[in-house]
Image: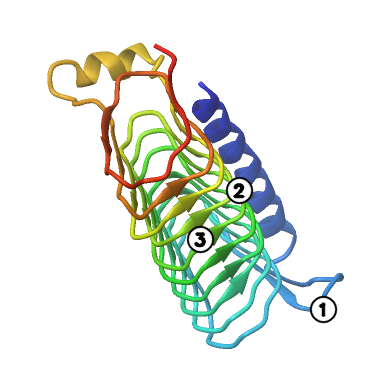
């Protein structure tokens, strides 16, 4: 239910902000930093290599931030977002689309999508959280996330990466490999949605939690449903609590 409420709030707020911004200005000077905002209703937006801009938004279209470019918030409703190598941006949000983050990117905010996956390459810094409702989240070597990593219906995969907050899912698998570290808890919630339970009945296996021998969970593991545990010898973890 929380994921659905988050989705509805994000959709309504994003649509309102983007529509108002696009109605008032198609390109406006940002008074705070002097960079120009870029806002459209329809169409792809591409920020060129090394370019410095303000907030970037569209309703129906993809957004591509090229190598070394810098932008404020990056938002769309129907479209994916791609951040190329060593780009620097603020918060990143889409409703219907994937988010792809290249190596060396700095995100000074959240990475959010509702219906899409999030793929983060090497040595990325995310200053807040990484969240999706329907999609997988993948973090590569050297990436750090300062807050939680969360999905409802998707897998979470960490390879040589660090998460300062919790890992949370409901219907997805979680995998920690190659010296990954979670400083918070791992939480696998119960699925209270009767439709999801009915849909997967008879053919949907239980979520799987895999932690290899080199990885660490400094917090605890909270299981609110049956989970297939695959924890290697040598893995450092907290206590395992079964709440079902």
Position of 157 relative to 34 (above/below) = above
Residue 151, above or below 201:
below
Residue position for label 1: 34
| Image position, residue 101 (x, y; %) | 45, 67
Q: CA distance from mark 3 to mark 1?
A: 25 Å
User: How far separated are the C-alphas under marks 1 and 2?
Assistant: 30 Å
Residue 96 image position (x, y, % from top left): 43, 47
Residue 105: image location, x then y, percent:
53, 73
Q: Secondary structure at mark 3?
A: loop
Q: Which is in the foreground here, disc 2 or disc 3?
A: 2
Q: Are marks 2 and 3 in contact (CB under 8 Å)?
A: no
Q: Which residue in the rendered view is the most extreme toward the bottom? A: 50
Is 51 placed left or right of 171 in the picture?
Answer: right
Q: Nearer the viewer, mark 1 or mark 2?
A: 2
Q: Residue at x 44, y 72 (%)?
A: 102
Residue sitting at x 30%, y 19%: 226
Q: Cβ–Cβ below 8 Å for labels 1 and 2?
A: no
Q: Nearer the viewer, mark 3 or mark 1?
A: 1
Residue furthest right as drawn: 31
Disc nearer the start of the sequence (2/3): 3
| Residue on which disc 2 sits | 147
Q: Is residue 77 left or right of residue 55?
A: left
Mark earlier in primary sequence (3, 1): 1
**Which residue is disc 3 drawn over?**
42
């Amino acid at each position: 239910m929380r994921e659905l409420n988050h989705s509805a709030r994000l959709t309504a707020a994003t649509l309102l902000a983007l529509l108002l911004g696009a109605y008032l200005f198609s390109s406006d000077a940002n008074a705070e930093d002097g960079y120009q905002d870029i806002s459209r209703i329809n169409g792809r937006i591409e920020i060129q290599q090394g370019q410095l801009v303000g907030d970037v938004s569209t309703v129906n279209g993809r957004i591509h931030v090229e190598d070394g470019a810098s932008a404020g918030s990056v938002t769309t409703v129907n479209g994916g977002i791609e951040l190329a190598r060593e780009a620097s941006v603020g918060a990143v949000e889409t409703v219907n689309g994937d988010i792809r983050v290249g190596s060396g990117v700095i995100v000074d905010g959240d990475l959010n999508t509702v219906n899409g996956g999030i793929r983060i390459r090497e040595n990325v810094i995310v200053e807040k959280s990484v969240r999706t409702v329907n999609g997988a989240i993948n973090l590569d070597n050297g990436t750090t996330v300062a807050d939680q990593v969360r999905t409802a219906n998707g897998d979470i995969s960490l390879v040589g990466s660090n998460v300062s907050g919790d890992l949370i899912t409901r219907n997805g698998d979680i995998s920690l490999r190659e010296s990954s570290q979670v400083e918070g808890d791992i939480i696998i919630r119960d699925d209270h949605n009767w439709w999801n339970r009915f849909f997967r009945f008879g053919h949907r296996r239980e979520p799987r939690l895999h932690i290899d021998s080199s990885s660490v969970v400094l917090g605890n593991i909270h299981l609110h449903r049956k989970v297939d545990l695959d924890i290697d010898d040598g893995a450092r973890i907290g206590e395992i609590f079964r709440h079902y």
